[in-house]
Image (cartoon, grey):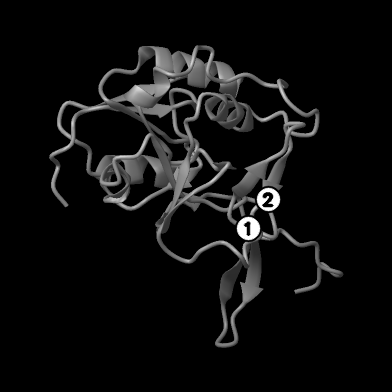
Amino acid sequence: MPLSHPPGTIVVPSGTLARYGAFSRALTHVSIPEGSQVCWVEGINVAANLNRGFAQASGEWIWILADDHVFAPDTLLRLLEHDLPMVAPVCTLRSPPHWPIVYRSESDDGSFEVWPPEELPMSGVHPVAACAMAGMVIQREALKALTPPYFEIGQIKSDELGEDLYFFHKAAQVGVMPYLDCDTRIGHITPMALWPTKRPDGGWGVWADPMCQIPTTAAV
């Protein structure tokens, strides 16, 4: 895929050091248009980190990443090819049942309707009310319609305090809608319980349980 896109900024609102080595490896190998920069923002307030990152960003687009994600080298270029105001890859919840994080509509009271996974399209690019901001590309031109701060916590329904939903709510007010690329995905890293296991052929092995279930006995 060609690197003929204008430069932009990758905003990582997770601190100065990545929690997961897989994220650092993915970032090292990702294809990025020439002249682009990576902006790391440190702090415990994600909304404040995003606002600071957006203020420091340069270029024609912003790609939002967090250090608990992993992605293929062509992820950014696939999203830039769509030339949409906002477009994101499919991302799932870290916790069970690990459904894709996608919302179909927003009600007048500020609540968002989850797009049932069994009804979510399997391919193509589709408009959505909101989705995971992991890996989302936002064009600089789209941000001109919004006024900072772009992200705040606790601005809509009390049970939906996320800075991401507030951003989508604010963008919808000025007619800037996000899209979901159902042919592109981003991985969500989650800790796992590693259980010592006795192999049938002798010796010890390990069983990785991403659900971190509690067994009924400690016997091995």
- Image height of 205 relative to 131, above or below: below
Residue 33 percent coordinates (x, y): 19, 35
Where is mark 2, residue-wise? Answer: 114
> How far from the left and from the top, in percent, is residue 191?
60, 50
- Mark 2 or 1 closer to N-term? 1
Front residue of 170/218: it is 170
Kind of residue indicated by mark 2: Val
Foreground residue, 174 or 35? 174
Q: Is residue 96 above or below residue 220?
A: above
Q: Residue at x 48, y 39 (%)?
A: 178
Q: Is residue 61 left or right of residue 3?
A: right
Q: Residue at x 81, y 67 (%)?
A: 215
Residue that numbered label 1 is attached to: 99
- Does 54 sit left or right of 72 as displayed? right
Quadrant for the C terminus in the image? bottom right
Give the image location of residue 169, x and y in percent: 61, 29
Please report the residue visible at 70 percent of the width from the left and 47 percent of the height from the top.
Answer: 113
Identify the element where label 1 is drawn: loop
Camera-nearest label, 2 or 1: 2
Tell me the element at label 2: strand
The foreground one among 75 and 110 is: 110
* Contact, mark 2 vs mark 1 (Cβ under 8 Å): yes
Residue 197 spot, x, y in % from top left: 64, 73
Q: Amino acid at mark 1?
A: Trp
